[in-house]
């Protein structure tokens, strides 16, 4: 779109996750004095105004008018959005820029989207039959789907004494424990040569020691993002550290890896995500259920990539187990079917 | 009386004055360092131009002064105080680096010996100072954001944006001010594309291989071998699972993955690091759910706000995954 005369650019991104912030700016010829009016649509809130003095603007009924600027030529915005009833919606932000005796009107559309994670169907009853030692057939599945445009990260909470998440798949778990122990040993060595990074390395070591996390919550996501971000920055900027870090990572991996767990971890990788933008990090964890349990009850917790938490989904279904054992272990993903994802039912 | 609801909304807006309150003491310290050199130089020389840059990855403030000798010098050397990282002094027409003979570094600053300067030449003095808490300064000073993901069904495009929260301090004092190589970390989600690029039959096949390796029952092994042979026939490939896994892992290296990334003008690709699994901070040598793409850009007087796009060519990536068979 050609911008006439004094106006250089009007920017709003084309899309944003709902419940997240997004930026915007307007730039113009700094020799021209301008007044800018912005119509902010419902569901969008202005949270930050940059390069504007305290008395340089007014906001009435979602109409923002800016008349003064610290320096002429640009203004920056930050908007926030609510989680909307609509799974995806296009909002129009209208800019009117008056200057040099003329008015330029520019409209920018932004798609606000989110995941829409649903339990599509629930069986009347789940029957688990032991077909051979340690192998179980599950008669019916809970059908799940993400009908939104954003990624859903899901985890499960089982509150009952008679069932709980037991462990990761044994071969992946064993590999991971041994790998992380050896890698942590390498990180402790690194600390002696790179004491300036000891704070980040200590946090990594602590996180690696807690390898059994299967429930994702906001606090964990924020910590992972923070520590991961600090690590990434160091790896990007310090080539010597980067070489030594990956040397130790590689050593820990090759020491503990073999073809079998490489294959297992790949299958695990395929089963913890779906083509419907669903991450299910604990999908291949084992669920331990007492044979006497007659109901399967749990909560599905859903987050998006902006760390917004959605209302938990409750599941409560009658259960019947046929087994010679008092307790059984089944891969968690076997309880679920993701629509159009028949392969997820495969596995161990 | 203002509408209480609107007054509440307005009070929640973060304004430039708040940013400036945080930034003022830090920027004042930066400018003081720059002024130590520029003001002292002005006493002896004619300053033709001065530039200030912040080199973000190195946490360095760089001050460039361009000057020539206006009249007879009153002294034969001058001392500049302040802990400096490096100093270089070069002349133009003819070009000559006279740092080694004209500059002496001290613990608390540096010294220029004037006897090596020629009145007929123009000089470029470059000084570099370390910035304490540079990350915090940049975070407070610049708003940056990249999109978390691209909506399903669209092309895989991530947006990047940055703008100064405040700029007027530098506008007043320098001909040129620049923030160099600001990092943008884009998490490019890939696992979904790996999964959908792998033929369903092949996933079943490697599950069979794994079951075969784990089984200790002779009859079950025989049954799984037969099943595996049938599955291989369906796939029509001679490659085995080990080759596939090796080839797929190689796709996640920076060297190979960069071909699937395009950045718009004003941004350059600096680095690519394999990401990790959701729920882990460590980039394991297993299977990344995303790749970390580090893009860089500059902000300056001409570009106080900047935006761009990262295009992830996922169809080409999926073709490459399929070609691993």
Image: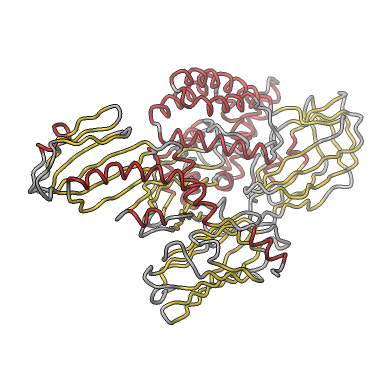
Closer to us: B11 or A237: B11
The outermost residue toward the front is B74
Residue lying at 67% horizontally and 67% vertically, measured from the top left: A42
- Please tell me in which quadrant of the rendered image residue A239 appears: top left
- Which residue occupies the foreground of this view, B65 or A347? B65
- Which quadrant holds residue B102? top left
State which quarter of the image contains the C terminus of chain A. top right
Report x, y in % for residue A37.
Answer: 54, 73
Colour mapping: secondary structure
Q: Position of residue A260 (x, y in %)?
A: 59, 25
Residue at the bottom extreme of this rendering: A101
Q: Where is A42 relative to B147, above or below?
A: below
- Check the image and report above or below for A324 versus B89: above
In the image, residue B194 above or below residue A38:
above
Left or right? Give the position of A131 relative to B75. right
Q: Position of residue A205 (x, y in %)?
A: 58, 24
Is A339 rendered above or below residue A227? below
**In front here: B58 or B281?**
B58
- The residue under the point 10% across, 48% down is B121
Could you tell me which residue is drawn at 52 percent across and 24 percent down? Answer: A253
The residue lying at 76 percent from left, 52 percent from top is: A118
Which image quarter is the N terminus of chain A in?
bottom left
Q: Picture coordinates of residue A193 (x, y %)?
A: 43, 19
């Amino acid at each position: 779109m050609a911008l006439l005369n004094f106006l250089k650019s009007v920017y709003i991104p084309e899309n944003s996750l709902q419940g997240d912030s997004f930026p915007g700016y307007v730039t113009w010829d700094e020799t021209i004095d301008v007044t800018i009016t912005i119509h902010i649509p419902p569901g969008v809130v202005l949270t930050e105004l940059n390069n504007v003095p305290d008395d340089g603007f007014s906001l009435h009924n979602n109409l923002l008018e800016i008349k003064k600027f610290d320096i002429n030529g640009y203004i920056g915005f930050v908007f926030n959005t609510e989680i909307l009833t609509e799974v995806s919606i296009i909002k129009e932000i209208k800019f009117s820029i008056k200057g040099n005796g003329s008015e330029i009107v520019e409209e920018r559309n932004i798609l606000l989207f989110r995941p829409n994670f649903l339990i599509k169907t629930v069986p009347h009853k789940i029957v688990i039959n032991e077909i051979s030692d340690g192998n179980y057939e599950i008669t019916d599945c809970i059908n799940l789907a993400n009908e939104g445009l954003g990624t859903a990260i899901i985890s499960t909470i089982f509150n009952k004494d008679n069932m709980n998440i037991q462990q990761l798949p044994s071969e992946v778990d064993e590999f991971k424990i041994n790998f992380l122990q050896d890698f942590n040993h390498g990180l402790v060595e690194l600390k002696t040569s790179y004491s300036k990074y000891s704070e980040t390395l200590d946090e990594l070591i602590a996180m690696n020691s807690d390898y059994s996390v299967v429930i994702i919550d906001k606090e964990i996501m924020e910590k992972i993002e923070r520590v991961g971000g600090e690590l990434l920055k160091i790896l990007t900027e310090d080539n010597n550290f980067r070489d030594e870090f990956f040397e130790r990572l590689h050593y820990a991996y090759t020491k503990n890896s073999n073809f079998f767990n490489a294959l297992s971890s790949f299958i695990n990788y395929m089963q913890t995500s779906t083509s419907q933008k669903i991450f299910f990090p604990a999908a291949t964890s084992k669920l331990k259920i007492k044979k006497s349990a007659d109901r399967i009850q749990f909560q599905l917790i859903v987050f998006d990539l902006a760390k917004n938490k959605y209302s938990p989904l409750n599941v409560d279904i009658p259960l019947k187990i046929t087994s010679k054992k008092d307790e059984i272990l089944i891969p968690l993903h076997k309880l679920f079917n993701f629509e159009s994802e028949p392969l997820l039912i495969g596995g161990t | 009386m203002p509408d209480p609801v609107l007054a509440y909304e307005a009070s929640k807006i973060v304004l430039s004055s708040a940013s400036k309150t945080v930034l003022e003491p830090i920027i004042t310290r930066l400018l003081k360092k720059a002024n130590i050199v520029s003001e002292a130089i002005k006493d002896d020389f004619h300053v033709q131009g001065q530039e200030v840059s912040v080199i973000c990855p190195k946490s360095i403030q760089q001050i460039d002064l361009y000057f020539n000798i206006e009249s007879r010098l009153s002294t034969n050397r001058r001392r500049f105080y302040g802990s400096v990282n490096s100093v270089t002094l070069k002349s133009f027409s003819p070009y000559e680096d006279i740092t080694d003979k004209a500059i002496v570094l001290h613990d608390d600053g540096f010294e220029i010996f004037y006897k090596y300067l020629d009145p007929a030449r123009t000089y470029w003095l470059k000084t570099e100072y370390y910035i304490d808490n540079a990350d915090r300064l940049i975070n407070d000073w610049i708003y940056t954001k990249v999109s978390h993901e691209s909506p399903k069904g669209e092309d895989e495009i991530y947006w990047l944006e940055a703008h100064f929260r405040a700029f007027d301090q530098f506008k007043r004092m320098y001909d040129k001010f620049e923030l160099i190589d600001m990092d943008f970390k884009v998490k490019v989600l890939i696992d979904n594309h790996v999964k959908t690029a792998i033929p369903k039959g092949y996933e079943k096949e490697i599950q069979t291989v794994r079951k075969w390796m784990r089984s200790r029952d002779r009859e079950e092994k025989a049954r799984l071998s037969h099943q595996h042979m049938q599955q291989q026939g369906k796939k029509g490939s001679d490659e085995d699972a080990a080759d596939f896994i090796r080839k797929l892992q190689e796709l996640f290296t920076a060297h190979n993955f960069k071909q699937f990334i395009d950045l718009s003008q004003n941004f350059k690709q600096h680095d690519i690091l394999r990401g990790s699994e959701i729920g882990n901070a460590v980039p394991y040598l297993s299977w990344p759910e995303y790749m970390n793409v580090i893009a860089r850009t500059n902000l300056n007087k001409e570009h106080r706000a900047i935006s761009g796009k990262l295009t992830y060519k996922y169809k080409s990536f999926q073709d490459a995954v399929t070609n691993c068979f």
